[in-house]
Amino acid sequence: MNKIQIKRVYAAPEESDGVRVLCDRLWPRGVKKDALKYDVWAKEITPSPEIRKLWHHGEMPYEGFSEAYIEELDASDGAAAFVKKCRGWLADRNVTLLYGAKNEQENHALVLQAWLGRKVKE
């Protein structure tokens, strides 16, 4: 069974990545546009600037950020369309969500991965 995985944009691409989806609203620091191997830049599934800034400035805990981000995803037509694309991709390959955050334990890609995992099974 194919899976949704996450990887920092700075990690080397692998054949097992399948469809590589950049899931950051802003281009990752220090990466040249022609140097990043990705298939789709999915800005429609990224956290809004409002909640991203609150979390990054320490004004919102990770748990609150996660809840707010999930609410945004649930209400987004763009995110619903992305779920359909993921179902199609997952039929024959993995989907890898690429993110630039330094923190590998608390980041939006983890929230997105879990949300997508639930949605593609519905």
Image: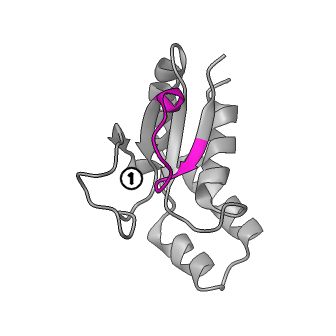
Residue placed at 29% from the left, 52% from the top?
35
Give how far across and how far down residue 122 sits, in percent: 67, 24
Left/right placement of residue 17 relative to residue 2 reads left
Give how far across and how far down residue 27 sits, in percent: 35, 63
Q: Secondary structure at mark 1?
A: helix
Q: Nearer the viewer, residue 24 or 83?
A: 24
Left/right placement of residue 25 relative to residue 87 reads left
Q: Is residue 80 visible?
A: yes
Q: Nearer the viewer, residue 111 or 105?
A: 105
Give how far across and how far down residue 104 sits, in percent: 67, 61
Q: Nearer the viewer, residue 63 or 90?
A: 90
Left/right placement of residue 101 relative to residue 70 reads left
Q: Is residue 20 above or below residue 71?
A: above
Quadrant of the rendering where the N terminus is positioned: top right
**Within-10-Å neighbours for mark 1: few <14, some 14–19, many 20+:** some
The residue pinned by badge 1 equals 43
Q: Is residue 78 visible?
A: no
Specify start and end residues of the magenta stretch as a single range. Answer: 6-18
Residue placed at 62% from the left, 21% from the top?
2
Left/right placement of residue 86 relative to residue 114 reads left
Residue 78 appears in which quarter of the rendering? top left
Q: Nearer the viewer, residue 5 or 32?
A: 32
Residue 61 appears in which quarter of the rendering? bottom right
Task: Determine if the magenta segment contains residue 13.
Answer: yes
Residue placed at 40% from the left, 61% from the top?
25
Colour convention of the picture: one colour
